[in-house]
Image (tube, helix red, strand yellow):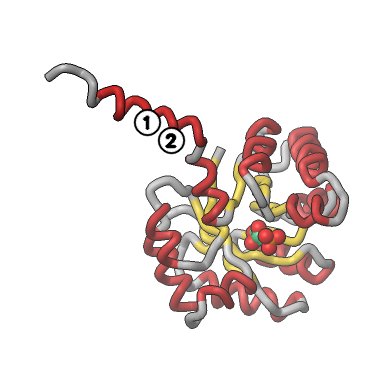
């Protein structure tokens, strides 16, 4: 499974570049980066050679296509994030024909993902955490999407997004989702287990008792 970092903070990306396969950003994360976003994207694309998602803010097809074309000029690993609206999916079709990769975002249901795949999206991002927040079952939605894509052999890849904790990553991997995008604190927690720390402390203290 590929792991992407869900952040626009260059220092987090620089630190974790050795293990991550790509990066996803969104306008909220761009605001948190606190710098001109084009400049930030250029740096990110230089650090990470895998896909780097950057989101359009236009809401109409024409505006989205125009914005996407500008963003795509930044680097050849830019993927354009487009919201799953009627206008958005029309833009996805156009961008497909132009050879620009898309990640259809704000996906909360299997039918939305199906339509995105039919329109030629390269990626779809179901937001599991936000679904769970509203009393739904984010992973059940991911399972449906994976099944549908498999049934029809859609090449569209699922990026499990809005990941809140390591359990989401394990569930995504168990379902066979190809990608999960995780915030920096969750990525840190994937490495950790208290028994590992205790085990190291015990081995080190016992090592002191070994005759030299
Ligand atoms: C995905 O690409 C989004 O950037 C992200 O996962 C949204 O997560 P949130 O619900 O924590 O904002």
Mark 2 residue crowding within 10 angstroms, few (<14) / some (14–19) / many (20+)? few
Identify the image quadrant of residue 151.
top right
Estimate the spatial distance between the alpha carbons at disc 2 and disc 1, rounded to whole Å.
5 Å
* Residue 154 position (above or below residue 119): above
Q: Which residue is nearer to you in this view: 91 or 180?
A: 180
Q: Position of residue 91 (x, y in %)?
A: 73, 68
* Residue located farthest toward the front when viewing the structure as drawn: 209
Across and down, in percent, residue 78 comes to: 52, 63
Q: Nearer the viewer, residue 156 or 196?
A: 196
Secondary structure beneath label 2: helix
Q: Residue at 33% x, 25% y: name it.
A: 203
Residue at the image point whose x is 51% and y is 36% from the top: 193
Is residue 199 left or right of 172 when viewed as pictured? left
Residue 88: where, in percent of width, then height?
76, 68
Residue 23 sits above or below residue 167 on the image: below
Q: Nearer the viewer, residue 24 or 80?
A: 24
- What residue is rendered at 81% in x and 49% in y? 114
Q: Label 1, on which residue?
A: 200
Name of the residue lying farthest toward the top: 211
Q: Quadrant location of the N terminus? A: top right
Q: Name the image quarter holding residue 55.
A: bottom right
Question: Residue sitting at 79 percent across and 46 percent down?
Answer: 138
Label 2 with label 1: CB-CB less than 8 Å: yes
List x then y, in percent, for residue 21: 48, 48
Q: Can you identify the residue that label 2 sits on?
A: 197
Q: Is residue 121 left or right of residue 148?
A: left
Local SS, label 1: helix
- 23 up-or-down from 159: above or below: below
Q: Which quadrant would the C terminus be assigned to in this image?
A: top left
């Amino acid at each position: 499974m590929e792991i992407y970092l869900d952040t626009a903070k260059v220092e987090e990306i620089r630190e974790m570049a050795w293990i991550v396969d790509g990066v996803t950003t969104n306008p909220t994360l761009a605001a948190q980066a606190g710098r001109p976003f084009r400049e930030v994207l250029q740096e990110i694309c230089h650090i990470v050679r895998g896909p780097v998602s950057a989101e359009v803010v236009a809401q109409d097809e024409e505006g989205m296509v125009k914005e996407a074309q500008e963003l795509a000029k930044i680097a050849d690993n830019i993927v354009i994030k487009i919201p799953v609206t009627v206008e958005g999916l029309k833009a996805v079709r156009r961008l497909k024909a132009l050879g620009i990769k898309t990640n259809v975002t704000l996906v909360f249901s299997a039918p939305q993902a199906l339509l995105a795949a039919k329109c030629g999206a390269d990626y779809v991002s179901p937001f599991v955490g936000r679904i769970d927040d509203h009393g739904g079952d984010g992973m059940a939605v991911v399972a449906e999407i994976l099944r549908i894509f498999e049934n029809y052999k859609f090449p569209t890849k699922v990026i499990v997004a809005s990941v809140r904790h390591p359990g989401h990553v394990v569930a995504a991997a168990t379902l066979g989702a190809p990608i999960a995008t995780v915030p920096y604190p969750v990525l840190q927690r994937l490495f950790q287990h208290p028994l590992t720390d205790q085990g190291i402390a015990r081995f080190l203290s016992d090592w002191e008792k070994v005759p030299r």
